[in-house]
Image (cartoon, rainbow, N blue to C red):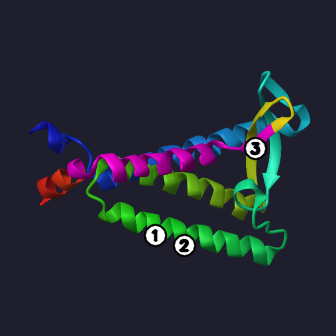
Amino acid sequence: MNDASARPSPRALGAIIALIALALDQGSKLWLIFVYGIEARQPVALAPFFDVVMAWNPGISYSLFRADSDAGRYTLLAMQLAATSFLCLWLWRTPSRIAAIGLGLLIGSALGNAYDRFAYGAVADFFHFHVGNFSWYVFNIADVGIVAGVAVLLYDSFFVVETSKQDARSQR
């Protein structure tokens, strides 16, 4: 058995990464909310520029498109699930292991935030960077996964074109 056949396919790799991203996101949220009790202890200063707080985001990034009603919440949830379905289809078809990693990060992270929206009506955010009077938005592990996933896909798009073509040829 050669080394290439021992590696998981891009689909399997993406699915594994998605499960890891989802588990890390949901595990951190469950622990911070229900075990540590962050709402009663906030803010927890970990550094002069970094706190752990509890913030519920009823919208998407930077609280855009706030969904304060059930109809709005379910509309955002439907949009998240549609986008995640598209990403799953992309993962199913990609021959690139690097793209599969980025897609897995996006899928698992999107599912983590979608679960929050479904279960709690808003997304749980915790991590807050700030310097002096400048405050960056509050985010969670899923948000980190989304940014990392996009960065990996951009890297794959701009720098790994030939490798992706070679991977596609070797799978035929």
Residue 99 picture location, percent across and down: 36, 52
Amino acid carrying label 3: it is Val
Badge 3 crowding class, 10 Å Cα cut-off, few under 14, some 14 to 19, many 20 or more, is: many
Q: Position of residue 39 (x, y in %)?
A: 87, 39
Q: In the picture shown, does residue 48 fall above or below 130?
A: above
Contact between labelled residues 2 and 1, with CB atoms less than 8 Å apart: yes
Cα distance between the residues tagged 1 and 2 = 6 Å
Nearer to the camera, 128 or 171: 128
In the picture as drawn, the residue positioned furthest to the right comes out as 40
Range of residues picked out in magenta: 135-163
- Residue position marked by numbered label 1 in the rendering: 86
Location of residue 59 in the rendering, given as x and y in whole percent from the top left corner: 75, 62
Residue at which label 3 appears: 138
Would residue 83 be counted in the magenta stretch?
no
Q: Mark 3–mark 2 contact, CB under 8 Å?
A: no
In the displayed structure, does residue 42 sit left or right of residue 136?
A: right
Quarter of the image where the C terminus is located: bottom left
- The answer to whether residue 76 is left or right of residue 154 is right
Q: Secondary structure at mark 1?
A: helix
Q: Is residue 137 visible?
A: yes
Q: Quadrant of residue 49?
A: top right
Looking at the image, is mark 3 or mark 2 nearer the viewer?
3
- Residue that extends furthest to the bottom in the rendered view of this protein: 71
Q: Which residue is mark 2?
A: 82
Q: Is residue 137 magenta?
A: yes
Residue 17, percent from left and from top: 43, 46
Q: CA distance from mark 3 to mark 2?
A: 25 Å
Q: Could you tell me which residue is drawn at 42 percent across and 64 percent down? A: 88
